[in-house]
Amino acid sequence: MAAEVSSGTKDPARADKVGADDYLRIVDIRKEFDGFVAVDDTTLSVRQGEIFALLGGSGCGKSTLLRCLGGFEKPTAGKIYLDDQEMNDLPPYERPINMMFQSYALFPHMTVEQNIAFGLKQDGHKRDAIARRVDEMLTIVQMTKFGKRKPHQLSGGQQQRVALARSLAKSPKLLLLDEPMGALDKKLRSQMQLELVNIIEKLGVTCVMVTHDQEEAMTMAHRIALMDSGRIRQVGTPDEIYEQPTSRFAAEFIGSVNMVNGRIEEDMADYVTIRSPKLEHLIHIGHGVSGFEGQEVSFAVRPEKLSIGKTEPTQPHNKAEGIIEDIAYFGSHSVYHVRLANGTKFMANFANMQRWASESLTWNDKVWVSWGENAGVVLTS
Amino acid sequence: MNAPWLKKLLPHPRWSVISVPYVWLLLFFAIPFLIVLKISFSTLAIAMPPYTPVLEYIDSALTLKLNLSNYLALVTDSQYFHAYISSIKIAAISTLLALLIGYPIAYVIAQMPPSSRNIWLMLVILPSWTSFLIRVYAWIGILKNNGLLNNALIGMGIIDEPLKILHTPIAAYIGIVYCYLPFMVLPLYTNLVKHDKRLLEAAYDLGAKPWKAFFKITLPLSKAGIIAGCMLVMIPAVGEFVIPELLGGPDTLMIGRVLWNEFFNNRDWPAASAVAIIMLMLLMIPILIFNRIQQREMEGRLT
């Protein structure tokens, strides 16, 4: 299933507004549990006002890294600086960092108002100042009517709003979100993603979130760090991560991809050709690649970048013939699974722009898949 | 057996299950209670049994004679009043001590890795496996003037003369707290072990120091466990007879001893019954309050 790259939620002017490039600096952080390395010498910088996502599968170390930021885990080695202040030796209750916990961890014996006021009370603010701030937060998350309720009297989405208000009430320098949508159903999830981003951006708070859901990371974050077995594999904006993966892992983790292995046959300044044993025709890349002739590489191309049709394309390369083995209908588009004569499989998306396709393709049809010379990426690692 | 009229006549099978506790309560609680209540309204008599009947049928006249003097005596004779107050005081202080000792024990066990929790719980319960009376007698051996404690303290040169602990209220407190501690620890543990650790992390995250997080989060959330533990200690402690009798001194006046005296020394069954009934009433009040609180919490959770 292809991930939808949506950056519409994020304010495009935002990129200019962000402040210091290294507001949060994570330098060579390492965390071991009984010899198991959860986070392996990780270095990261997060800009002021940025929403930054740590994305990865379970056990990739993203949550451990987040807990190191919150102060709940002590890194084995390395330093964390926030706004040029070292965080390592500060306990959680002295860090200017607040966290929205997975499944929220709202205090069950306190009302919504008391939950939000809890952090403010610890700072010894005056009672009326606290009340004013609580009202303000309730307005921001649109929960003014529910201030006197207890958490168990709220729906999942409402609990999330309260959790967000509680973690933002102290105006933290850094907001941590641990799987923010984990406890919501799918429909509510996409709505809350947009709302959460709007609130966080309105307040201008720097935010690091952890998620295993690539769509969530792409929808919410300005930049994403893709993590795997304790290491960061790639850092970039959602479209960079999606369109320019730098490794096979990155290409396969985000969205779906067609990948074939081959060797560089011609390595020119302005084009490269790749010979793959799986393909009858050459792969032609319309730009230079840092590699050498004869090097083993992988060629990755997203399904939506493939064209599919019954007639043979005129171009001499970047094409393959096969039969349609399977069709997955998604409403907005269909995914055709094409099997080549040698068994290699390609996925091609076909947008369902008309309610009745002009050229209807069906099972066992002989078809050609083809792609442009800038459609795919060459991966060397 | 399958005839429909018979099915209608016979109670539903589920009643055979539900009725067991009801029959039990009727036989071993309600009927004895009514008998004691009846005796408490009778008059002392030198007879067998040693009281006059409340309900009499003589010469086709049914007479119900309720003698209130037993209850009036409880009000007028300050000895009873003092015994009640003293019992409640001793039980309340013991309960508080048991809470102060039991809470940290339950808390520490709940924090332990799950594998070792059961071992420590066993160690808390284990003493209850020996006879209650033997354990109380053992305390005599520890607390008496030339007992273990005094010998040890003198041996270490901390004191010159033995401390007089046995046959003082202190010994009674030690005995009650010791015997009832498991009943405090168990409900507290059951409550504390269910606490979500992330709530404390959230409190730290919001700026609460560990001790403050304990008082703001852990303590209020363990309220149900505290109430249950206190009930389990307080209620039997009020009526306790053996421990104050064996360990306490002549000034350790408790209602259990008054009951004993009325029954066995004065053979005044009606007065003893009245004392028992009033004691039951005194104990019912906290139980009812406890039930009310629990019910309210349950309702709050449902809406």
Image: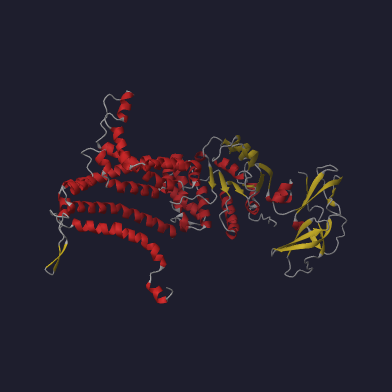
Question: A302 or B190: nearer the eye?
Answer: B190
Name which quarter of the figure residue A355 lies in.
bottom right
Q: Which quadrant does the C terminus of chain A fall into? A: top right
* Image position, residue A372 (x, y; %): 81, 55
* Image position, residue A256 (x, y; %): 72, 54
Name which quarter of the figure residue A332 lies in.
bottom right
Residue at 57% over, 35% down: A86
Compared across the picture, whether A121 is left or right of A16 comes to left
Q: Which quadrant does the N terminus of chain A fall into? A: bottom right
Looking at the rendered structure, the number of numbered marks drawn on it comes to 0
Res A311 visible:
yes
Q: Furthest-left residue in view? A: B59
* Image position, residue B142 (x, y; %): 31, 33
* Image position, residue A133 (x, y; %): 47, 49
Q: Furthest-front residue in view? A: B1
Q: How is the image coloured?
A: secondary structure
Residue at 21% over, 47% down: B260
Compared across the picture, whether B208 is left or right of A284 comes to left
Residue at 69% over, 63% down: A330
Res B212 visible:
no
Compared across the picture, whether A58 is left or right of A319 comes to left
Question: A219 or A322: nearer the eye?
Answer: A322
Question: A221 or B149: nearer the eye?
Answer: B149
Name which quarter of the figure residue A37 lies in.
top right
